[in-house]
Every structure is written in structure tokens, then in C-alpha cells.
């Protein structure tokens, strides 16, 4: 329960998303395809949350992954799903617009 609250309110050490991306992190946008088409972070891969587990085998479990969506709710679920499937280094980037501004450095 404590981890859920920490994740919900992003309590914990600050993540430098720009550094992660510059070092090869995968940006995984879990919004629906039509949402992704209306705007997204350059280089992000679109895998809608409802299809994530079908595509999990295509993602390297050793890679650093940053999930994002519209507000951060679906990306939080995606992060937890990936961690439950053996991914170790997954970060919830929250809403894509907010994450995009963090990546501008």
C-alpha cells in the first residue's frame, strides 16, 4: 500500500528522464493509437495499454523503459504490469506533455 501511495504521488528520488533517454531508454506511450496520432514524443513507441501484455515479448527486459500516457494513470498501470512480468528498470513518466517538457533539458 505504501508503494502504491508513493507511486501515485511520485514520492521518492527524482528521475532524470532526459539522462535516461539520452542513454537509450525506450519511451513507451500506452495511449490508444488515435491519441498517439494526435501528438506524441518524437521517438516514442505506441503500444496501447490494452495490448501491452500481447507485445511484452518484443521488449527487451534489460532495457530501461519510460511509460507515458495522457495523465499518468495508464502509464502507472503499464509500469506495474511490466514489473510484474520481469522488467526491472521501468519508470512512470506520467503524462506525455509533461514528460516532453522534461526531455527538452
Image: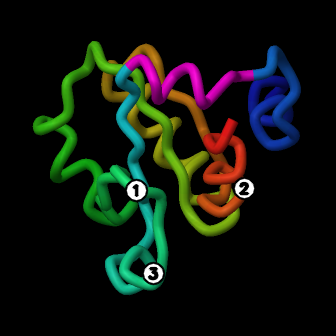
User: At which x and y percent is residue 38?
Assistant: 45, 84
Of badges 3 and 1, nearer the viewer stands: 1
Q: Is residue 49 left or right of residue 90?
A: left
Task: Check the image and report above or below for 104 versus 34.
Answer: above
Going 12% across and 38% down the picture, which residue do you hit? 58
- Alpha carbon of mark 2 to alpha carbon of mark 3: how far? 15 Å
Task: Check the image and report above or below for 32 versus 75.
Answer: below
- Secondary element at tag 2: helix
User: At which x and y percent is residue 77?
Assistant: 54, 49
Graded by Cα atoms within 10 Å as few (under 14), some (14 to 19) or many (20 or more), the crowding at tag 1 reads few
User: At which x and y percent is residue 27?
Assistant: 41, 43
Q: Check contact, mark 3 vs mark 1: CB within 8 A.
A: no
Q: Quadrant of the C terminus?
A: top right
Of badges 2 and 1, nearer the viewer stands: 1
Q: Main secondary structure of the magenta part?
A: helix
Going 30% across and 53% down the picture, which residue do you hit? 45
Q: Check contact, mark 2 vs mark 3: CB within 8 A.
A: no
Closer to the chain start, of discs 2 and 1, is 1
Residue found at the very far front of the displayed protein: 105
Total of numbered circles in the picture? 3
* Residue pointed to by mark 2: 98
Q: Is residue 86 left or right of residue 12?
A: left
Q: Quadrant of the N terminus?
A: top right
Please provide the residue range marked out in magenta. Answer: 15-23
- Secondary element at tag 1: loop
Q: Is residue 53 left or right of residue 94?
A: left
Q: Check contact, mark 2 vs mark 1: CB within 8 A.
A: no
* Residue pointed to by mark 1: 42
* Residue pointed to by mark 3: 35
Amino acid at each position: 500500500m505504501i508503494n502504491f501511495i508513493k507511486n501515485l504521488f511520485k514520492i521518492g528520488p527524482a528521475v532524470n528522464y532526459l539522462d535516461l533517454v539520452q542513454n537509450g531508454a525506450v519511451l513507451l506511450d500506452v495511449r490508444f493509437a488515435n491519441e498517439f496520432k494526435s501528438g506524441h514524443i518524437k521517438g516514442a513507441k505506441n503500444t496501447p495499454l490494452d495490448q501491452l501484455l500481447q507485445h511484452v515479448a518484443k521488449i527487451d527486459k534489460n532495457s530501461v523503459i519510460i511509460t507515458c500516457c495522457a495523465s499518468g494513470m495508464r502509464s502507472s498501470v503499464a509500469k506495474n504490469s511490466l514489473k510484474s512480468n520481469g522488467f526491472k528498470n521501468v519508470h512512470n513518466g506520467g503524462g506525455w506533455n509533461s514528460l516532453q517538457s522534461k526531455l527538452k533539458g
